[in-house]
Image (tube, rainbow, N blue to C red):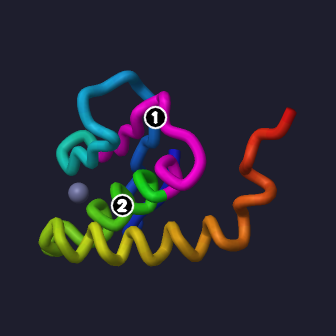
Amino acid sequence: MIVIKERNWSVTRERMANFGECDYDTKKITVHEDLRGHAEIETVVHEVLHAQHADWPEEDVLIRGQEIADALWEVLECRLTVTG
Ligand SMILES: [Zn+2]
């Protein structure tokens, strides 16, 4: 369970049609279970931005999400990349 704007949200990984989903009614963020690396980070950030900013158009969520994901990936890549 995580808190977004003082409300409890769940975040789960599931097999699904899209990369991710943000359900305002059930307060649930879902991320496709096969995603890894940058795509995984970008999808989580993207869906959290949707949860935080229900009024933002998709284009803004897409661009702001990419910016945050790129920054996180820049500093975390070496720790998140699976080796061996
Ligand atoms: Zn979106």
Q: Quadrant of ligand 1?
A: bottom left
Image coordinates of residue 84 in percent, x first then y, are 86, 32
Q: Residue 46 carries which label?
A: 2
Residue for point 18% across, 71% down: 59
Q: In this view, does 26 lie to the left or right of 39?
A: left
Q: Quadrant of residue 42?
A: bottom left
Instruction: Tell me the SS state at disc 2.
Output: helix
Q: Which residue is drawn at 31% across and 75% down?
A: 63
Residue at 41%, 39% (x, y): give it: 31
What's the magenta region? 27-41
Label 2 CB less than 8 angstroms from ligand 1:
yes
Q: What residue type is labelled 1?
A: Thr
**Is 66 situated above or below 9?**
below
Magenta segment includes 15: no
Task: Classify 10 Å Cα crowding around label 1: few (below 14), some (14-19), many (20 and above).
Answer: few
Provide the residue designation for mark 1: 12
**Does the segment drawn in magenta span residue 38?**
yes
- The residue sitting at 32% across, 43% down in the picture is 20
Element under disc 1: strand
User: Position of 51 compared to 40: left or right?
Assistant: left
The kind of residue on which mark 2 rests is: His
Q: How many marks?
A: 2
Q: Which of pointers 2 and 1 indicates the residue nearer the eye? A: 2
Q: Residues within 10 Å of mark 2 (few under 14, many from 20)?
A: many
| Quadrant housing residue 72 | bottom right
Residue 41 x %, y %: 52, 55
The residue most toward the top is 15
State left or right for residue 10 relative to residue 77. Answer: left
Mark nearer the N terminus (2 vs 1) = 1
The residue at label 1 has a CB less than 8 Å from ligand 1 = no
